[in-house]
Image: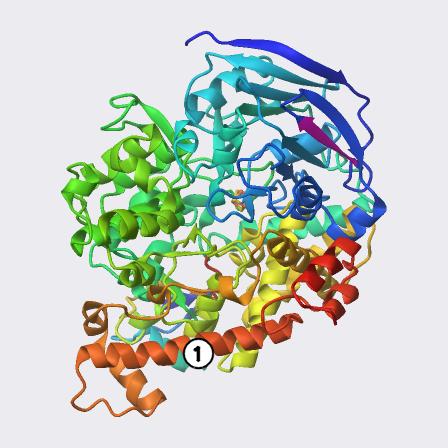
Amino acid sequence: MKTFNLKEIKSLTYQRPEIQKGYANQTLCVDITSADISIKPVSDQMKQIFVGGKGFDLWLLWHAVSGTTQWTDPENTICIASGPMGGTPSYPGSGKSIVTSLSPLTGSVIDSNVGGYFGPYLKFSGFDALEINGQASREVVVYIDGVSETVTIFEAGDLPEDAYETSSVLTQHFGNEKPRGISVVSTGPGAKNSLMGCLNVTWYDPKRKRARYKQAGRGGLGTVFAHKGIKAVVARWDTVSMNSNNPADKETLKVVAKSYSREIVELDPKQNEMAKIGTTHLVPIMNDFDLLPTNNFKFGQHKMASLIGKDVYKDFFDPGFDGCWMGCTVACSHGVKDFVPLTGPYKGVKVFVDGPEYETIAGCGSNLGIFDPFTIVEINFYCDAYGLDTISVGTTMAFAMECFEMGLINESHTGGLNLNFGNRDAALELLHQVARGKGFGMVLGQGVRQMKKLFTSEFGVDAQILEDIGMESKGLEFSEYMTKESLAQQGGYGMALKGPQHDEAWLIFLDMVHNYMPTFEQKAEALHWFPMFRTWFGLCGLCKLPWNDIVPEDNKDTEEPAKVIKHMTWYAQYFGAVTGRNVVPEDLITISEAVYNFQRIFNLKMGFGTRAQDTLPYRAMGPVTEEEYDSRQERYDSQLTEKHGIDIEGKSTAEKVAALRKLREEQYEKLKDAVYERRGWTQNGIPTVKTVKRLNIDFPAVLEILKKNGVTS
Amino acid sequence: MITLDGEQMPWKNGMTISFLLQEIADDHPYAVVKINGRYVSRPNFDTHVIPENAEIFLIPMIAGG
Ligand code: SF4
């Protein structure tokens, strides 16, 4: 192993507070320009309104930046927080953190949730949240040692370039005697050379004796991290137990945690088998329902999809109990042992690959027309090691491939790369180029929105076709679900605060398969309720997967199966047992509503957050090309005739494409009207004064922003 | 015989998943059914024939990502 140097620049010794009802009651602020380390109190108002996690992140970021701050400015801040329940070892999925910052891809606020031990260790070390601002002149490592009650900034020299090795060497360095007590946040060269960098957050795997990692992938958080000159942030903590959060009601916590954990152990083997196959079960299911993005979201199905499904990855995964937080019985964080890449700096070397998960398989597999499971694992490995978001990489590459196949770009633009769908060698080469910031990879690393601009301005490509097939909204690349046949999910993507990521709403089955919400009003209700409840997980330090990926056997007989009310009731009890705030399930929605609306207004502060930004490329709504229409002709013809009463006799495919487009675009606008009304927003998509007052977020600065945007009541 | 969610019930030659759901009068819109560890999705319910001695779980799948 190469030697490296860590030279102390500044250190602060502090007294670690006792955790009280899930809170350390203070946050840590590190300014890496001046090497200033300070501690700020957490107010009761902060806890009451913003709860923790993403709520705390947003509050801290709001105060750190102005409406004109750019992502590259030193005052842009990276905030990381878990939440009051974060770090509970026995309740499944209780180790998540949320990272926020201003995004290089969207220019506005981005948030991304991630597993690994960092958030809980940060809190147990004495801090509910960490904010890092400034700009280092040389690469730094920030080390938060909760055991010795010291925060240190080191100048870092000669650390490995990529996250794979950096995670490993820093775990060894700081956790020599007890590596399980270390969590490392780091990125890699891809984050430096693109706008789609991710952060890797580690958890130590005692069975395999190695640092494993999860990714805060979306929106270029790794790029901000790298741009600031942060090489890594490391937290160290000792032992974790049910007492670590000093819960308000330990007995209730024990009971509810045990019930939840037991249910998962009993039902997961019958249902999705996530403990064996992670989220790979989704591949064949999405394919059967014509929802697996294929060739840049053109199609939803492919005859070779079974080659990249759960049956294949079940054999790839190294068996074990793989939870990204202690005691998570869902244990879905699988990995591939002794994988040998065929390309790149690790060519021929045995590596451990964390993943792949569904999103990576779909984004870097089917959506690129690649049905080779080994190539997907290799892309997965390099994305993580290079610090690149697999979703943005996949969706951007798919866009480039379609442009290439359509002849909009050619080998003279791609540096000789043949970017036909399915060309796995080209996909891997392009990925290495992105990481190096070389060749066409430099272009790809800018993301779909910038590529569209560049293809038009530099290569003279028609802007309209690029708008239609470039799968981004608000500047963020789509995550990997087809939305053409689900209006509700179009709303779930198009009206998501940060851009088209499914963590706000995943309504495809409810809409398409179960037909639970046939009217606009019902869809709007779902687009209110689900984003709010899903937001709540990110406030508390929780993973959403246990809520509805494994459901009670009698759930289907309940009044609203989609809400999984039994689990929601347990979550309300869990929240009360830790924080001492007694709540009923519906209170969780109101709690989240405050943060959700605050984030929408934060977007407004940054010059976004109105109806004009809640747009979608037409590919997300319907068939752009005649080829797409013809491939599902029966479906589209019958919709035009039976649903909309249009006479298609004698109409050409192009005319039918245009007729369907008009109808679907109108429907999406109607949906926006209904959702805005349900959320208590104006028809321009801005929360009303009445709404912010109801939610107690009517701070003077909030009201001023609303007023500036013409909202006064 | 087949086992459905842990309960034994008679098997009929050529029975499909749609037929089974009709037999048990369960009109819940299941997206997926697991038969001997393999998923069968709703679009294939009408055609997928259940083998004898199959172990079946009806999956009330509502989540994705
Ligand atoms: S469900 Fe999976 S992703 Fe969520 S905390 Fe558990 S192991 Fe991690």
In this orientation, which residue lies closer to the viewer: A566 or A7? A7
Is the CB–ligand 1 distance for label 1 below 8 Å? no
Say which residue appears at 55% left-offset and 19% top-offset: A137
Q: How crowded is mark 1: few (under 14 residues within 10 Å), some or many (20 or more)?
A: some
Q: Tell me the magenta residue range.
A: A26-30
The answer to whether residue A445 is left or right of residue A327 is: left
Q: Is A641 situated above or below A619? A: below
Q: Residue B65: in sight, yes or no?
A: no
Q: Position of residue A199 (x, y in %)?
A: 50, 34
* Quadrant showing the N terminus of chain A: top left
The answer to whether residue A324 is left or right of residue A635 is: right
Q: Where is residue A680 in the image (x, y as percent from the top left)?
A: 67, 71
SS assignment at label 1: helix
Q: Position of residue A270 (x, y in %)?
A: 46, 56
Residue A27 included in the magenta stretch of the image: yes
Say which residue appears at 43% left-offset and 20% top-offset: A165
Q: For residue A624, what is the image quadrant?
A: bottom left
Q: Which chain carries label 1?
A: A
